[in-house]
Image (tube, rainbow, N blue to C red):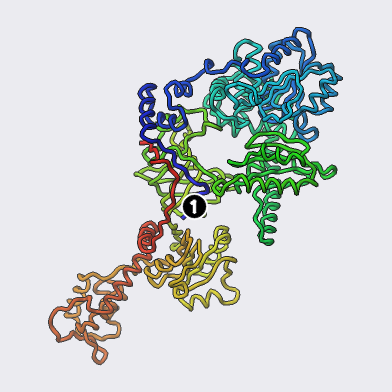
Amino acid sequence: MLQSKTRWRLAALDVEGEARAAALARALSLPPLVARLLVQRGYDRIEAARQFLTGGLECLHDPFLLKGMKEAADRIALARERGERVRIYGDYDADGVSSTTLMTYLFKRLALDFDHYIPHRTREGYGLNIAALDAASAAGVTLIVTVDTGISAAREIAYASGLGIDVVVTDHHEPLQELPAAYAIVNPKQEDCGYPFKGLAGVGVAFKLATALLGEPPVEWTDVVALGTIADLMPLTDENRVLVRLGLEQLRATDKPGFRALADVCGIELPSLLATHIAFGMAPRINAAGRLDHANAAVELLTAVDEETAAAGAFRLDELNKERQGIVEDILREAEAQWTAKCEAADKAGTRRPSVIVVAGEGWNAGVVGIVASKLIERHYKPTIVLGIDPETGACKGSARSIDGYDLHAALTVCEEWLDHYGGHQAAAGMTLHRDKLAPFEERLCRLADEWLTEEDWIPKLTIDLTCKMEDATLKVREQLAKLEPFGAGNVAPKLLLTGVTLAERKTMGKEKNHLKLALAGQGKLLDAVGFGSGHLAERLSNGAAVEVVGELAVNEWNGQRKAQFMVSDLRVPHIQLFDLRSEPDCESLRTAERLLATDVMRQSQGVLLVPNEAWLEAATAPDQLKLPERFRLLTYEALAGQRVPCRRLAVFGKPPSAEKLAAAIASCSDLEAVHLLYAADRESGEFPTREQFGQLYQLLRRECPLPEAGAAAGLAAKLRQPADRVAFMLDVFKELRFVEESEGSLTLSAVSGKKELSLSRHYRDGQRSAESNAILALPVKQLTDWLTVQAGLIHNRTIEQENEGVGIS
């Protein structure tokens, strides 16, 4: 058995939903599969579904519906007319870089006198700052246009006004109660803004400003919009979906040197570019500039006009990204150690473990702490804040990531008495505070989590869109699912539950062996499956196990061949797993058992090492012999019989006395997940003589008797071409039934006539039971699992939350 790491919820359609799906399929000529998914995602009306699938520029909203847009556009037009010096003020993340790049494109087309400024993440921090405003004033700047920042800069914008600088704010972050007194604010999240879509990225707001100034949407810049929108995890719904789809089309045929060079270092084939390539390839490299160096390097790449400059810039970002990955791993190790210490301290004190992870370290690079926070959430599923501490000033700069149900921005607002600055939204945020304020800050955050979250909120949920069998895991089905692209936040790739398959092979992949590669078998077919970051499961899965796998259907292209591949999000094994070590050399040696017990999975589990009898027990407990893991017990079958022993992993060391006793021992273990078979399985010993073989021996005895008892079994066995121990057993049966008698060292046939059933012999019955037991213990692991399932009740039923009945592909 292997439990899933998430709680599965199977989506479903009621009768009305199925009817709407059928209507969509007919009206839009869609495969039923796609129609069902559209209805599940809320697109159950024909026009809404049509717009979702094929909507273009006509679906974009009028930019002047954004509050402040007319004032912003008029002020920039006035600056152009007057020849004023204008400065774009951006942010250092991928959305900020994309916004700055798009505004650069725009201001070049408008022939403005302009430049751009992005603060250094470590030296200046997020947003507008006084020193940068002084520098702008000294440079003769009279208008600043912010992109992806500015909504929380009330003090700084007031200062700019005192310098004679007008500020136009374009942003998408959550506004504070006090809005800045800017010349104009364009942010769809303003309380009284009637714009119909609130999910624009910073670059999306910049795009709307460009549309307002140019009089039409600049489709050729949607590539930059796609980059920023995907990188900032904005929902790919409404006009974001349109902009990203158009942007991907632009990128697939782009002639922009910067994007071409970036794709090259990422190993991305532009003609087949997907949103995931941006999310996991391009965006991290753009972000790496602002995290470790300066975001200007990324802007320069995206605005490069020649191939040589672009190639050098892309190479630099790729190197920074590799450096960033190493720094993240170092900080993650330290952060994990801090969190472990906090949990141990709480356990020792008998108090509840903290509900929010708050970790801070001197010298931690503030540019990567958000990534560390995301990784900690993946491992522990708790709201997480990671902060870097300046050892000289005590200032802490950090990033936060959250889980469903815990609104980070709302929590930080409650805690603002301890914060120097903060901003963000429900799922992600940034903040600065002094290290002396960390303790009360953490305590309040934890209290809020305890108040806001229910018991269920602490369990990550995974929504499954469809159930499928191996016959559904095809390229044709994948092409149907592709109609719903682009996939990302707000429109995730459909999650499929693959059932009716067994594990044919498993292994790890990658330099660090941290990825999982599976071969799944079912319906006479094999399907490759990959689980990134799941390499640790390889030793917890047994070949032949029946597995249920949740993930996405993808396409693997290699050497010109395309085939379906399953990308694993989660999996489980609903039965006790048998790990078959019976064919290992010296499988019954103490050293072999010790090697098994020394593996990580055994050391981290509660378990039992089961030995056949007291003699084995004495041998294992002799000085300098077997070393048991801390949470393991050494027991015999007699000691385990009739008990309920907490045991997740049972190691069966030495051949069991019988199959029935093995089944009884397994049934005595509570919470059992796996059984490791560590004994020699003699398949030959499981063969019980047939009635025909008994008859052949009897006929031979009639010819040979009397004969010396000494060596009789061996001699008879040679003539019958049977094993000597089998013939010896048949002779014992004949003696018990008085077919054969012993007299003065000789064997003679009895004078007693008549037939007797072999089953009247105790030797025969005991031998039959022993042979059956030996045969069971020597069965291939799949058949042995099936037998034990029936005998010991090894199936652990796990429910899947569902509405009515789940939706199947076929």
The answer to whether 565 appears left or right of 255 in the picture is left
Q: Quick one: which residue is furthest to the top in this view?
A: 81
Identify the element where label 1 is drawn: loop
Is 655 situated above or below 74?
below
The answer to whether 798 appears left or right of 214 in the picture is left
Residue toward you, 33 or 724: 33
How far from the left and from the top, in percent, is residue 531?
A: 52, 44
Report if residue 252 is visible in the image.
no
Q: Which residue sits at x=57%, y=65%?
A: 631
Residue on which disc 1 sits: 3
Write down the quadrant of residue 809 in the picture: top left
Report if residue 691 is visible in the image.
yes
- Which amino acid type corresponds to the residue marked 1 in the rendered image? Gln
Q: Which residue sits at x=59%, y=15%?
A: 62
Q: Which residue sits at x=84%, y=16%?
A: 140
Is 22 situated above or below 571?
above
